[in-house]
Image (cartoon, grey):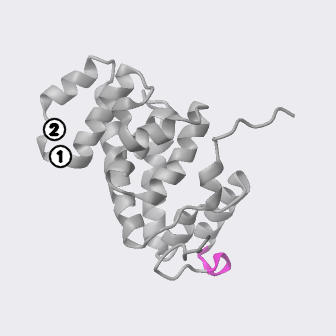
Amino acid sequence: MNHPQPLSRYPVPAIESLPADVKQRILEVQEKSGFVPNVFLALAHRPDEFRAFFAYHDALMLRESGLTKGEKEMIVVATSGANGCLYCVVAHGAILRIYEKNPLLADQVAVNYRKAAITPRQRAMLDFAMKVCLRSAEVGEADFEALKAHGFSEEDIWDIGAITALFGLSNRMANLVSMQPNAEFFLLGRVPKAKG
């Protein structure tokens, strides 16, 4: 039986009541995806933090990089799984399925990336991300050398660590406010689109 939960334990402002820039960002996302991901609504509770979070998110996730869009999402899904973040595993799992055109990969990466159908390079990337996620004090030169052996640059390694760290924040905030994933995310990318 379906028991709907509120999308956040904190008040969610009406879109019309938000500052113009925050409202515009939400409406742009809605137009592009066909719905408003709950993270935008939940974080709009504090507009200054909304702006700061999405500015850092965009700076990392949209920048040119030696990582593909799919690899960036693999990092988010694997580390969010380790952090027990339902919202980020479901939402970013959907994005990963779409980018990689693979309906199986996101679940594999979320549960145990070591058993996932990924390349050795991607496995090394996720090994490092998980170390940053769970044991960042232990990161050392050998970790950088292992990634460089797979062709990652110093800037790519920063990207891996920074994405892990940003989503560590995101995972903890999502868990703090009991953020619920949109129903749409559960289905996205699981069945190929009909050719029309």
Quadrant of the rendered structure where residue 1 is?
bottom right
Q: Nearer the viewer, residue 3 or 7?
A: 3
- Spatial distance from mark 2 to mark 1, Cα to Cα? 7 Å
What is the residue that sits farthest to the right in this orientation? 196
Q: Is residue 155 visible?
A: no
Disc number placed over residue 84 in the picture, else none? none
Mark 2 or 1: the one toward you: 1
The percent coordinates of residue 133 (x first, y second) are 26, 47
For this view, does 110 lie left or right of residue 104? Answer: left
- Taking the spot 68% from the left edge, 78% from the top edge, the residue there is 16
Q: Residue furthest front?
A: 1
Left/right placement of residue 154 relative to residue 109 reads left
Query: Which element is circle 1 on?
Result: helix
Q: Is residue 75 above or below residue 167?
A: above
Badge number at residue 135? 1
Q: Amino acid at mark 2?
A: Val
Q: Is residue 92 a member of the stretch shown in magenta?
A: no
Residue that appears at 44% across and 71% down: 178
Segment colored magenta: 14-19
Q: At 28% across and 41% down in the image, what residue appears? A: 130
Where, by quadrant of the figure, is residue 29 drawn?
bottom right
Task: Name the spot of residue 115 as percent of width and height, x first.
Answer: 37, 30
Q: In this view of the protein, can residue 127 be seen by the observer?
A: yes
- Looking at the rendered structure, which numbered label has been put on residue 139? 2
Residue located at (26% from left, 35% from top): 128
Q: Is residue 146 above or below residue 53?
A: above
Residue 125 vertical placement versus 10 (above, below): above
SS class of the residue under badge 2? loop
Q: Do the CB atoms of the residues marked 2 and 1 lie less than 8 Å apart?
A: yes
Q: Position of residue 194 (x, y in %)?
A: 80, 36
